Image (cartoon, coloured by chain):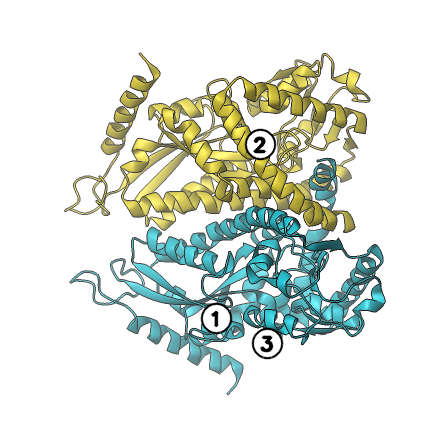
Chain colours: A cyan, B yellow
Amino acid sequence: MKRRNFVKTAGLASAAGLLSACRSQTSTATDCGPGQAGGKHEWKMVTAWPRDFPALGTGANRLAERIGQMSGGRLTVKVYGGNELVPPLEVFDAVESGTAQMGHGASYYWKGKVPAAQYFAGVPFGLNAQEMNGWFYYGGGLELWREVYRPHGVIPYPIGNSGVQMGGWFNKEILSVDDLKGLKMRIPGLGGEVLARAGGTPQNIPVAEIFTALQTGTIDATEWIGPFNDQAAGFNQAAQYYYYPGWHEPGTALEVLINQAALEQLPQDLQHIVQYACQASNLDMLSEFTARNGESLQQLREAGVDIRPFPDEVLQELQRISLEVLEDMTSNDELSARVYASFKAFFGKVRGWNEIGEKVILNMR
Amino acid sequence: MKRRNFVKTAGLASAAGLLSACRSQTSTATDCGPGQAGGKHEWKMVTAWPRDFPALGTGANRLAERIGQMSGGRLTVKVYGGNELVPPLEVFDAVESGTAQMGHGASYYWKGKVPAAQYFAGVPFGLNAQEMNGWFYYGGGLELWREVYRPHGVIPYPIGNSGVQMGGWFNKEILSVDDLKGLKMRIPGLGGEVLARAGGTPQNIPVAEIFTALQTGTIDATEWIGPFNDQAAGFNQAAQYYYYPGWHEPGTALEVLINQAALEQLPQDLQHIVQYACQASNLDMLSEFTARNGESLQQLREAGVDIRPFPDEVLQELQRISLEVLEDMTSNDELSARVYASFKAFFGKVRGWNEIGEKVILNMR
């Protein structure tokens, strides 16, 4: 079966699945097709994180709650943790097939299936969180993202951004570029490609398995997010050194995926509620990361964690390789090339602005 | 009449005003009190900006549109530019009295009436946009802001943030601290207090009057926002030098004000729609500023505008005075002291985090 036919069939199957999930709220409303404002809709949201995981899982819970509140209960969303309905790294497939109407994850998880997807999570040494949102909403980024997912019948929304991440937890000291050679590290997306070219062995494993892999020496190092989540995951119990900065993820955007056919079944007002609930939650989650990372870093310092910067030499080499990897990767894929070209053009302008704004202020404080 | 009684009376008047604005949407809905989901509500939003002013006015328009879309037209908001219904600097009073149910402005405009209000717009050399939102939503800032406005029957929402601003447009060169003495400058809020102590003469005049004041020499300098808005206002036609950074406004939060009695008249789902529409628009406006400032700065550079940094000596002196002013001002007002204490505690933690995150990345790019 060709992809295009498969997508059409999947879309129809999904719409049928949605209709069967409708409940009549009043005696006169017998279905919940477009315009039937009285109908009641029940959605499932699958996520790439453990249930109630700090900031990620709880952020997804709050998004679901907001949709329920704004719709007066006409659209309810049930949240599933990773592995409850589908495995964490099968969220995209589940939304594409209509198993769930909604998913919460990060676009670089699907790079094997949709290579151009990963740029929407961020680029090493690239845009920070505020700039990513500028690119999405006012720089053409979100339109491109929608175009990339359209053949799959899936609509993306940026929702949540970790801000700058940490470099990761290491059981090997990184004193020079040579120490990256042979390094087995959990690091997904473009950062992983860069590490591979620097001689390391990148891996992508779900968060629930990282701690054990680190403790047993299956991996030498892992990046995860920032102080708040890393503390919650207990990585300081399994690694010796906590390196900064998160060169590979200077402002990682998370995403909500929505099955297009399911969305189009909703009346217009509920479609708008979903859209703006996502935008509100985008800021909500970034704000939680910003606040809690500050608190957790202080606690990790007080607990005596060995927090250290990567040597300048290492960062410079990683930056050099990053640019090389980005140019190489985009030259093989037309869609990736267009996405990266848009990203670069936006980056050039916004960096010029931040050079005389944000950066000057941060350096003075 | 004592303030408390006045507030109560105003609240009742406002509620009555709201009820009279209700329209029945169906033949069975005769009013629009709480729980009457079928009722139709018409609100007014007064703003402190000219109608359709870039980013500020258009952002307010988009907020109104979103509320209409999400409510399926059950709550419509009509937006008024400054001076259309009330003058720009009387937005707070208009919402307090119930003349309008909603207002869009910036909290430092009301410092004469509510001294503690201005910290919620930002503090010189203080939090940036992302950190402000962290403080509001996850650091106790928004709770304090609500407490500060509660005696006035007005509920604040952070909506829109300019990001770091520019230092302003000058017709006098600033080569040393001495050049600040006698400087007549449009600069509101805490930045104005700092300039006064440095020997200057701060003024707060609405945007529509700034250009003429600058051109005629009534003022020597003005700050306004950043490249996007400053370009739209045409200040490069009235001043010689464009200085950076915006030391006085490192991440200015704008605000929506809502008349509490009017809000409480809405059914629960519409109250939630207003709340999350505001949060979505908060990110929407910041994203527009971020994207457009990058573009406009490039255009201003190409047009040959003389863009220059304040001398280090001047910035260091302004920073020293800022801390002094903040300590002095808060010592005279219990509420200001509590707000500033919360701000400072949050700042300490989040700055520690950004020192090894955001700042390191910005300095490498």
Instruction: Tell me what residue is drawn at x 64 percent, y 32 percent.
Output: B230
Tell me the tag on residue A113.
3
Instruction: Tell me what residue is drawn at x 51 percent, y 29 percent.
Output: B339
Determine the CA span between mark 3 and mark 1.
Answer: 19 Å
**Three-letter amino acid code at the position of disc 2:** Gly
**Protein chain holding label 2:** B
* Residue B222 visible here: no
**Protein chain holding label 1:** A
**Three-letter amino acid code at the position of disc 3:** Lys
Please, which residue is most extreme toward the bottom here? A1
User: Which of pointers 3 and 1 indicates the residue nearer the eye?
Assistant: 1
Disc 1: which residue: A82
Asked whether the residues under marks 3 and 2 belong to the same chain, the reply is no
Tell me the tag on residue B349.
none
Determine the CA span between mark 3 and mark 2.
Answer: 44 Å
Determine the CA span between mark 2 and mark 1.
Answer: 40 Å
Instruction: Tell me what residue is drawn at x 81 percent, y 20 percent.
Output: B176
